[in-house]
Image (spheres, grey):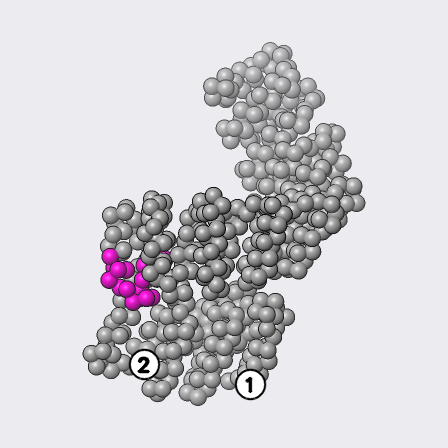
Amino acid sequence: MCMVGEVLSAVHLFDKMTENGVKGNVYTYGILINGLCKIHETGLAVELHRKMLNLIGKANVLTYSMIIDSLCKDGLITEALEMFLEMESINISPDFVVYSSLINGLCKFGRLMEVGFLDMVGHSVSADTVTFMILIDCLCKKGKVGEAYKLVELMIQLGKEPNIYTCNSLIYGLCMSGKLDDAEKVFKSIVDKGGEHNVTSYNILINGYCKHQMIDDALRLFQEMHCKSLKPTSVTYSTLVGALCQTGRLRTAQKLFKDMQVCGLSPDLHAYSVLLAGLCKNGHIEEAICLFESVKSTELESNIEVVSILINGMCRAGKLGEARKQFDELSKKGLVPDVVTYNIMINGLCKKLFLQMEEKGCSLDSISFNIMIQGFLRENEIDKAMQLFGEMHNRNFLPNEAVSEMEGYEPQLAAVATGSHIDAIPYSGKYDGVVGVLGAIQAINVLKRFVFKHIRSLEAIMFTSEEPTRFGISCLSRLATSEITYYAHM
């Protein structure tokens, strides 16, 4: 009956049987409990489990694991933990399914640290290496690397040696936390302990270096993979291509992209999109168009994000006619433009009108400049925004709140902020790194000359301890700090 979906009818029939003195066994109860859990009748499954314990005084790890898994999926974490403690109290050792169900449930609902489950695992004789591995991975993905290390220490104390998967989880967590040196140490410790790296180990650390713009370190690892006869995956190539494009090393990115294909790896949508964006960003629009047209892929042509990248590149390069053509053809491809696509077209058309005003002798005013500055900033075209900003200053136009957007336009922030590693600050300014700091300094200088009445304080922020790591220089700190100090209470 359970196999054909008549679970409730089967339970009703079983109730009749028990009323007539048929107690059943653990196997019978297990079938019914499994059926109830599958149709999301977890409450009835728990009741039947209690009935089984009362009538026959027996249970097994299978019945507990089914109920704990179902309770976790329903978000009933407290009840699942009570079942976990109950099974240990009657000397039934939790298995992999029990631990993985609880760990996934606790992580999903953010209660892993709250309920003391880690202590339960630490004192449980049944917790094996796989259990610890799942827990450590979950903690690292949640950014709780410190707690993950405690579990690693506990593993070692219990004689359970961390494996390559545990080390990979730690490397990932450390990279996510920006602790690249510690991640490299864990990476090297794998070999020091007689183990071997796998492709995942390299991919994780390469991605970490790329996210922190340490491209040379990432490329060093990439070469090391080849020396060890480890084959990079499409993920490896896509990560490196994207990072190289973002840092302006376009030719190296294109070479890697070609090498990827020579190695028999087919670039996926992400690989194409990052290279396309890199070509557009660095002004190689003709190459971007050739790349787009050379790929006879329905997936590529039918992706609105990819097409929007190309349209944006065309607008930036002044090819508004071609951009409009691509935009008009979206409907033929069954694509619906989103707000990003419309904003790209609106921005491009505004730039064209701005230029036409100048060409036709129509005098630009401060409002015209401020509108264009805002547009450039939203497109992250900092150089063009600063160029217009300087032109605005030369014409003695007074900047308005658009200037505040050059430092940070989030209204939730009490102080307008810009500078190195500003992306780590919630609701902070828009521009990061060297350009952000220099942009802040230039903007503050101009504001001071205009005696601008700002409504929020201005702060340029530089994390000096991380600057050499990210940019390979430290002299900028002195410049930034001296300027910031001078204008701290402007």
User: Mark 2: which secondary structure?
Assistant: helix
Classified by dominant secondary structure, the portion drawn in magenta counts as helix
Which one is in front, 34 or 129?
Answer: 129
Q: What amino acid type should be assigned to the residue bearing mark 1? A: Tyr
Question: Would residue 298 be counted in the magenta stretch?
Answer: no
Q: What amino acid type should be assigned to the residue bearing mark 2? A: Ser
Residue at x 69%, y 22% (from the top left corner): 58
- Which image quadrant for residue 350? bottom left
Q: Would residue 138 be visible to someone looking at this image?
A: no
- Which image quadrant for residue 106? top right
Query: Residue 277 in the image: x percent, y percent?
Result: 40, 59
Left or right: residue 458 compared with residue 160: left
Judge whether 382 appears above or below 364 on screen: above
At label 2, counting other C-alpha atoms closer than 10 Å, the crowd grade (few under 14, some 14-19, many 20 or more) is some
Query: Residue 137 in the image: x percent, y percent?
Result: 63, 46
Judge whether 54 appears above or below 341 on screen: above
Residue at x 44%, y 84% (from the top left corner): 447
Query: Residue 187 in the image: x percent, y percent?
Result: 67, 52
Residue 366, numbered label: 2
Q: Would residue 63 be visible to someone looking at this image?
A: yes
Residue that label 1 marks: 486
Left or right: residue 335 compared with residue 256: left
Tag 2 near tag 1, CB within 8 Å: no
Which one is in front, 378 or 454?
Answer: 378
Residue at x 39%, y 74% (from the top left corner): 385
Judge whether 37 appears above or below 463 on screen: above
Query: Residue 466 in the image: x percent, y percent?
Result: 61, 68
Residue at x 60%, y 15% (from the top left corner): 18
Range drawn in magenta: 309-325
